[in-house]
Image: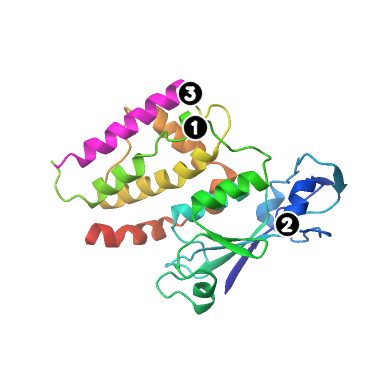
Amino acid sequence: MSTARIQPTVTAACVLSSTIKHRFGLTSLHLPTNHSAAFRRQRIKRNLTVSMSVTSALDPLEICVKASVTVPDKLGDCPFCQRVLLTLEEKNLPYDMKFVDLGNKPEWFLKLNAEGKVPVIKFEENWVSDSDVITQALEEKFPDPPLAIPPEKASVGSKIFSTFIGFLKSQDPGDGTEQALLDELSAFNDHIKENGPFINGEKVSAADLALGPKLYHLEIALGHYKNWLIPESLPYVKSYMKEIFSRDSFVNTRALPEDVIAGWRPKVMG
């Protein structure tokens, strides 16, 4: 198994919720010692409300993700994997990535996840799949900082990804797939204009972490296969993408453009 260890540096005593400690059955915790250059820039302080203080950190959560098809031992192009990784990053949780070659799934992976899908994360002794389920569980187990979003805003931008795929696969310029995508992007542009800079206002939320990776794929795939760019008439979409893509959490978890291009090639070429 290929493993990349991500462990944020803890510089001060952190507070651990007794509820979380009970759920995970933790009786002793150990301070990570991996001071990687990537995390020297972002010292992380956890602010979990509690009844007990300890000078320690959670053990890394194990997560299986898609492996790159262009560079060995690198993260691949799955937007659903990135969604979960973004959640871990934004919540300042340490994690270990295990890269899975989805073109040749190893036996160890199929034993823990018979469906053979990623992402899969280990909670206690159980492996849990599906990015919706995983991110909800992370929000419940690690509520700070909060990423939950009001129900009325949870579906904002939710149709962009499907219309992007329809346009990407289309071979007929007049079939309406481009306009369908533009309609969804225009509605999103209006929402960000009135509510931004993020979907839920001033702070990033779970909805942004779900949509951001999909917009990243949209930008790269449509730019490569159709020479298509977000129109200048949608400035709030463009500023939103710039804001999301520049976050440390996104930079740390984004796929290589070459992997995104390779990942969409079968759908484009048929």
Measured as percent of width and height from the top left, residue 85 is found at: 56, 52
Is 118 covered by the magenta stretch?
no
Q: Give the position of the N terminus as an image quadrant.
A: bottom right
Magenta span covers which residues?
175-195
Q: Secondary structure at mark 1?
A: helix
- Residue visible at 41% across and 55% down? 257
Image location (x, y in percent) of residue 98:
57, 67
- Report the amino acid beneath label 1: Pro
Q: Looking at the image, can residue 254 be seen?
A: no
The alpha-carbon separation of the residues under discs 1 and 3 comes to 15 Å
13 lies left or right of 206: right
- Give the mark toward the camera: 3 or 2: 2
Q: Residue furthest bottom?
A: 107
Q: Earlier in the sequence, mark 3 or mark 2?
A: 2
The residue wearing badge 2 is: 24
From the viewer's perspective, is residue 143 above or below residue 101?
above
Pointer 3: what residue? 195
Q: Which mark is residue 151?
A: 1
